[in-house]
């Protein structure tokens, strides 16, 4: 009886850790959109390689972003992407 209960407890803990890992990982780590690499930019929600490249090109052409919301000046990035990432985007 104890063995079954211990196995069930271990499985339950493993499931909790597996589900909590991505949630916790997504909530940490700010991204400075003025200095972030392509790989760092793709850690933002809804930002794949294509949009990361556009962000890098935008800052090369227009200079550094003055505030996080300015990411919406990049063609194709709108308020939805800003809202998903506003707690992680920083500018320095």
Image: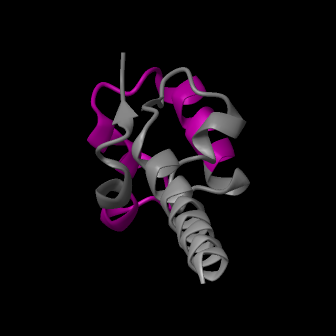
Residue 89 sits in which quadrant?
A: top left
Which residue sits at x=55%, y=57%?
A: 22
Q: Is residue 60 above or below residue 40?
A: above
Quadrant location, the C terminus: top left
Residue 80 image offset from top left, x and y in percent = 34, 67
Which residue sits at x=30%, y=25%?
A: 66
Camera-side residue: 48 or 27? Answer: 27
Main SS, magenta residues: helix
Q: Is residue 79 above or below residue 52?
A: below
**Residue 54 shown in magenta:** yes
- Residues rendered magenta in the picture: 52-81
Q: How is the image coloured?
A: one colour
Camera-side residue: 45 or 74? Answer: 45
Camera-side residue: 45 or 17? Answer: 17
Residue 50 image offset from top left, x and y in percent = 70, 55
Quadrant location, the N terminus: bottom right
Which residue sits at x=66%, y=75%?
A: 3
Residue 90 sits in which quadrant?
A: top left
Residue 63 image offset from top left, x and y in percent = 47, 21
Lateral position of residue 54 relative to residue 49, left or right: left
Residue 91 image offset from top left, x and y in percent = 36, 24
Which residue sits at x=54%, y=64%?
A: 13
């Amino acid at each position: 009886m104890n063995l079954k209960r211990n196995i069930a407890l271990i499985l339950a803990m493993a499931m909790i850790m597996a589900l909590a890992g991505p949630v916790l990982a997504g909530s940490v780590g700010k991204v400075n959109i003025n200095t972030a690499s392509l790989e760092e930019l793709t850690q933002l929600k809804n930002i794949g390689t294509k949009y990361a490249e556009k962000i890098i090109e935008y800052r090369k052409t227009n200079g550094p972003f003055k505030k996080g919301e300015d990411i919406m000046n990049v063609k194709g990035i709108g308020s939805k992407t800003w809202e998903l990432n506003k707690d992680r985007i920083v500018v320095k």
